[in-house]
Image (cartoon, grey):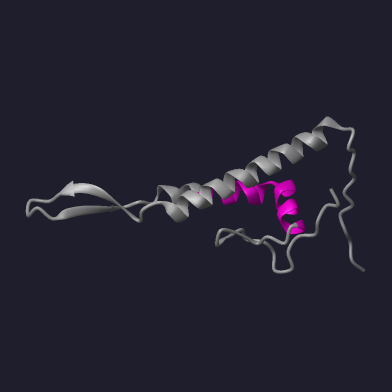
């Protein structure tokens, strides 16, 4: 026998709408972070060494920011439910760590 979480929707409740706003804001933040990570240069100019060669520095900040946003998404049940309902397991090629079968939409 399968047990399921029954999610109750109270559209008149302020907390329901607050959770929705926060979840969609988090999804938008993830989309912006993914775009920045895809468009950012892979290396930054770190100056020159004693021979005049360029010192390249890996630009990891956009990827670290994307990792943080993915962790925040995974911690937000509403956001993951929305993404699951949309059939999205990735944002711009970044895996969101969805379960293999995806998440069941919360009917909200």
Residue positioned 65% across, 62% down in the render: 89
65 up-or-down from 14: above or below? below
Residue positioned 90% across, 38% down in the render: 10
Left or right position of 13 against 84: right
User: In front here: 21 or 64?
Assistant: 21
The dominant secondary structure in magenta is helix
Where is residue 69? Give x, y as percent: 56, 47
Q: Going by the picture, which residue comes out furthest to the right?
A: 1
Where is residue 107? Give x, y as percent: 86, 52
Residue 77 sits inside the magenta stretch: yes
In the rendered image, the quadrant that contains the N terminus is bottom right
User: In front here: 1 or 108?
Assistant: 108
Left or right position of 27 against 58: right
User: In front here: 76 or 42?
Assistant: 42
Q: Going by the picture, which residue comes out furthest to the left?
A: 51
Boundaries of the magenta span: 66-85
Residue 71 sits inside the magenta stretch: yes
User: In front here: 100 or 37?
Assistant: 37
Where is residue 90? Give x, y as percent: 61, 60
Residue positioned 73% across, 49% down in the render: 77
Where residue 86 sits, quadrant-wise, is bottom right
Residue positioned 61% across, 46% down in the render: 72
């Amino acid at each position: 026998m399968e047990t399921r979480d029954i999610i109750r929707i109270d559209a008149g409740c302020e907390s329901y709408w607050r959770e929705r706003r926060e979840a969609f804001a988090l999804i938008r933040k993830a989309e912006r972070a993914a775009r920045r990570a895809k468009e950012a240069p892979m290396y930054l100019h770190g100056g020159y060494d004693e021979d005049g060669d360029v010192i390249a520095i890996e630009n990891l900040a956009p990827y670290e920011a994307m990792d943080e946003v993915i962790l925040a998404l995974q911690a937000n049940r509403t956001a993951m439910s929305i993404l699951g309902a949309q059939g999205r397991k990735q944002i711009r090629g970044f895996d969101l760590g969805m379960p293999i079968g995806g998440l069941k939409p919360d009917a909200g």
